[in-house]
Image (tube, rainbow, N blue to C red):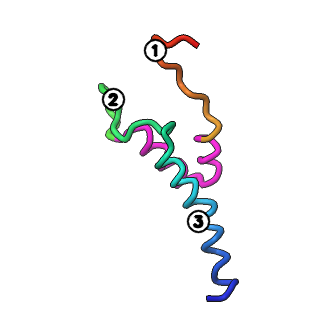
Amino acid sequence: MSDADFLPWLILSALYGLPLLHVALSPRGGGWRPPPGSRCPFGPRAGWLVMVLMLGPVGWLLFALRRPSRIRGKRG
């Protein structure tokens, strides 16, 4: 395999594969199951994965730069 064949795979894995892996393994991604009472069949982590898959690096930046939600009852 020449360098010309390797470069597109490197770009795809860097721009899509690594962000998808980060969202899938990050503890900040949320749960895989939807919150109780939700009408959506997907959890927050699945939603983030779809956003990263559709938007690529922009979706990953949205995930990485989001503000964490405040936990009820916790002061800070």
- Numbered tag placed on residue 13 in the rendering: 3
Could you tell which of marks 3 and 2 lies nearer the N-terminus?
Answer: 3
Q: Which residue is mark 1?
A: 72
Spatial separation of the CA atoms under disc 3 and disc 2: 33 Å
Q: Are marks 1 and 2 in contact (CB under 8 Å)?
A: no
Query: What segment is highlighted magenta in the picture?
Result: 42-63
Q: Is residue 46 left or right of residue 4?
A: left
Q: Is residue 75 left or right of residue 5?
A: left
Spatial separation of the CA atoms under disc 1 and disc 2: 18 Å
Residue lying at 53% horizontally and 24% vertically, measured from the top left: 69
Q: Mark 2: few, some, or many residues within 10 Å (few <14, many ≥20)?
A: few
Residue lying at 59% horizontally and 52% vertically, measured from the top left: 55
Residue lying at 42% horizontally and 45% vertically, measured from the top left: 46
Could you tell which of marks 3 and 1 lies nearer the N-terminus?
Answer: 3
Q: Mark 1: few, some, or many residues within 10 Å (few <14, many ≥20)?
A: few
SS majority, magenta: helix
Amino acid bearing label 3 = Ser
Q: Is residue 60 above or below residue 7?
A: above
Image location (x, y in percent) of residue 11: 65, 68
Q: Secondary structure at mark 3?
A: helix
